Image (spheres, rainbow, N blue to C red):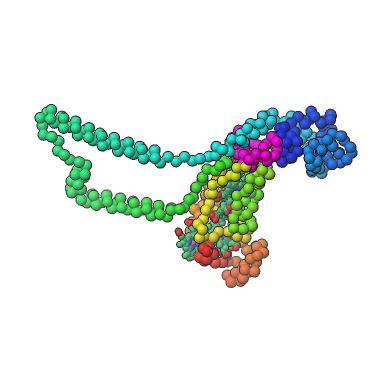
Amino acid sequence: MCHSIGSNKIIGPGLEGVTDRVPSPYEDWMAKWIKNNVGFRKSGNAYANQVFNDNNSTTMPVFEGILNDAQIKNIIAYLANPPKADAAITKEIQAASGTAGAEQVKTTKKPWIWLIVVGVLAIATVVLRTVRKTLQLVLSEKQHSAPPIDTNIWKDFKRWIYNNKTKFALVCISIFTLLSLYGWEYMWGIDVNQGYHPSQPINFIHKVHADDNGIACLYCHSGAEKGKVAGIPTLNVCMNCHKGIQGTNPEYQKEIAKIYYATGWDPVKGDYTNPQHPIEWNRVHSLPDFAYFNHAQHVIIGKIACQKCHGDCSSFTTNQQAATLTMGWCINCHRETPVQMEGNGYYTHLHQAIDKKFGADKKITEADMGGLECGKCHY
Ligand code: HEC
Ligand code: HEC
Ligand code: HEC
Ligand code: HEC
Ligand code: HEC
């Protein structure tokens, strides 16, 4: 959070080459500084006071009692022999953060290409038919035979229907049934966007954050425990970590550089000195305005895990809408899910009344509490 292992300053100085610049033997000086830099400065150590003054007189936390001697020794050994590439990476990222954000992902749809293909095929058909007709005419003239009878597909077809009335009726009925079934399915699917996963301006991967690094959903979507909207975190929340975390591979670095581009952060100076370019995330879930859904009601009162409705986002690489979000989906769950009767202070008296009405051992679902009433979900 506070130091990079390159040369750039974050809150404290970059730690590249630190073991060469502090008074030797560096193990002793650094151990004292990390353990209790405040006491060390008070004892009058000149270099300790210089470090303090050089860094805007910002006090570093005291780690005595937090880190033991062995852990401090390990940190010093790590800094004496850090991973090599970091300084170079920082420079690359600084260069990239000027431009990377600009090349935001755009999906290019080209329906006109298909129009052109269909047009060309239509023209080719007409031209080929004309050529065939002309050739037949020329041939018949050469052989002095009668010109070919002027039939066409439509005339042939009508003759076939006339001779096969039952077969034709059967074909018609089958086609009608298939189309109706398809139409029925299609209409149920209108505006059901299950699986929708738009591309995002920053390729933010939930798996990397919520799964690999175990960050709680509510750390970023804190609104979900307080009210209706879960909310998308501001880039300030990202910068809590990404001031220091620049990514361990070029792909991550390129994406993380977009956060710097957006917030105007200069990773070398360690300050927000560049122009800002707000991120426009693409919304994934969206209920119609006439339906009311409240996160806190479900997450805090109902104690329902995010994953129950959003799928296992922690394994997604691109975020997607896991559920159908239809009214049937809401209603089914209200019919099936037993209400958590324990430990919901706000509802205790209500739950007690319901227990009395239905008997304490009946499984009480949200439907029993009025969760099927139109007015609960529709304004
Ligand atoms: C480090 C911050 C962070 C963490 C942790 C996090 N998210 Fe997200 N989440 C985001 C960002 C940024 C977006 C917007 C970009 C996107 O849609 O991929 C988002 C989008 C979403 C969306 C879609 C929002 C929409 O537009 O409809 C859902 C649902 C979601 N997160 C659920 C979760 C769940 C469930 C967890 C825990 C397993 C979680 N998130 C953990 C940052 C985070
Ligand atoms: C609690 C710390 C933390 C927060 C908060 C956080 N990240 Fe990350 N982020 C990480 C870690 C750790 C990695 C993995 C770095 C690696 O393995 O190289 C990472 C990796 C990334 C990557 C590269 C992998 C990928 O997902 O494509 C991007 C982009 C990223 N974060 C964007 C964001 C955005 C945007 C936010 C704010 C919504 C955010 N991060 C908030 C810790 C955090
Ligand atoms: C009972 C089902 C359910 C649960 C549980 C749930 N969500 Fe949602 N979530 C939804 C629905 C429905 C929407 C669409 C809301 C809308 O469009 O008004 C949504 C939308 C979102 C959004 C985008 C829109 C917004 O409200 O900001 C995010 C982010 C999100 N959920 C995150 C979470 C997180 C994190 C959790 C767990 C703490 C969670 N959700 C738990 C059903 C659920
Ligand atoms: C995973 C199951 C689940 C899904 C899906 C779900 N709900 Fe719920 N819902 C619950 C439970 C459980 C409660 C009861 C919480 C409590 O009071 O203990 C609840 C409560 C509610 C309430 C409060 C009702 C009251 O009695 O005051 C509303 C409103 C609501 N849900 C709307 C919705 C809407 C709208 C959707 C669909 C977009 C939805 N829910 C999807 C489980 C679900
Ligand atoms: C548990 C919450 C819930 C309850 C209770 C509920 N609805 Fe809905 N309803 C929804 C949601 C969410 C949608 C939006 C579904 C979608 O976008 O596909 C919806 C959609 C609808 C639509 C479709 C509108 C359209 O344009 O497609 C109608 C009509 C409707 N509800 C009527 C009712 C009536 C009448 C009742 C009472 C008998 C009722 N609803 C009870 C959640 C609920």
Inspect this view and state whether residue 245 appears. Answer: no
Q: Is residue 270 part of the magenta span, yes or no? A: yes
* Rendered residue at 63%/65% (across/down): 347
Q: Where is residue 10 in the image (x, y as percent from the top left)?
A: 72, 38
Instruction: Name the image quarter holding residue 268.
Output: top right
Question: Is 241 left, or right, of 369 in this rendering?
Answer: right
Q: Where is residue 367 in the image (x, y as percent from the top left)?
A: 54, 64
Question: Is 168 left, or right, of 275 in this rendering?
Answer: left
Q: Where is residue 310 in the image (x, y as percent from the top left)?
A: 55, 51
Q: Where is residue 135 in the image (x, y as percent from the top left)?
A: 19, 30
Instruction: Name the image quarter holding residue 33.
Output: top right
Residue at the far right in the pictured view: 43
* Rendered residue at 56%/66% (across/down): 369
* Rendered residue at 31%/36% (across/down): 121
Question: Is 38 left, or right, of 192 in this rendering?
Answer: right
Closer to the camera in the image, 333 or 23: 23
Q: Total label count?
A: 0
Closer to the camera in the image, 301 or 143: 143
Instruction: Name the image quarter holding residue 88.
Output: top right
Q: In which quarter of the image is the N terminus?
A: top right
* Rendered residue at 43%/53% (across/down): 190
Depicted 106 relative to depicted 216: above or below: above
Closer to the camera in the image, 42 or 293: 42
Question: Is 78 left, or right, of 159 in this rendering?
Answer: right
* Magenta residues, start to end: 246-275
Q: Is residue 336 part of the magenta span, yes or no? A: no
Depicted 347 relative to depicted 65: above or below: below
